[in-house]
Image (tube, grey):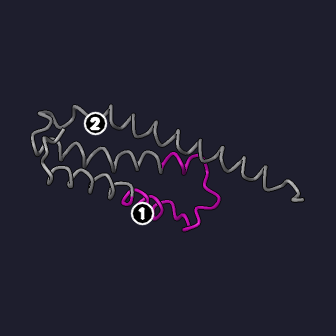
Amino acid sequence: MFGGNALESIAVATLSATGPLVAVYLTMRWLKVGLNLQGLTTAQLTVFAVVGALCNVIPHNVFFWLVGITSNLFIGLIPMFIGDLLGTVIVLYALRAALLLFERFARFPTV
């Protein structure tokens, strides 16, 4: 996608790494959630997902527009936002299922 341009690749990797960190930091402060994330509600998880998607989509699309990868600043916003949101929901439900399985197996007595 970047034609071997190392600087653009590093920039996209940096955006991909810092976006989620910024989203978690902002959301935890806004919702006043503790570091252990205990007691998160569905509404709070939804806020995490939406803020995470926004903190990923906006910087990427601005960067792609600035370097000329896309000619329109807004063309990739909706597809990338939906993809990020759906990906987050899939991961959250997979983690929830894994935790439920872990709890179920943890209740079995050991022999």
Is 56 magenta? The answer is no
The relative height of residue 52 versus residue 78 in the rendered view (above or below) is below
Q: Mark 2 — residue?
A: 77
Q: Is the magenta stretch mostly helix, strand or loop?
A: helix
Q: Do the residues labelled 1 and 2 touch (CB within 8 Å)?
A: no
**Element marked by disc 1:** helix
Q: In the image, residue 6 lies at what x, y percent? A: 15, 52
**Element marked by disc 2:** helix
Q: Mark 1 — residue?
A: 25
Amino acid identity at mark 1: Tyr
Q: Which residue is painted at 79% across and 56% down in the image?
A: 106
Q: Please identify the quarter of the rendering in which residue 37 is found.
A: bottom right
Quarter of the N terminus within the rendering = top left
Magenta extent: 21-47
Q: Which residue is painted at 22% across and 31% down in the image?
A: 75
Amino acid identity at mark 2: Leu
Q: In the image, residue 25 lies at what x, y percent? A: 42, 63
Alpha-carbon span between mark 1 and mark 2: 22 Å
Q: In this view, does 89 lie to the left or right of 8?
A: right
Mark 1 and mark 2 lie on one chain; the one further toward the N terminus is 1
Which one is in front, 111 or 94? Answer: 111
- In the rendered picture of this protein, how many numbered marks are placed on residues? 2
Q: In the image, residue 35 lies at what x, y percent? A: 54, 68
Is 39 magenta? The answer is yes
Q: In the image, residue 54 lies at what x, y percent? A: 35, 46
Q: Which residue is painted at 32% across and 58% down in the image?
A: 18
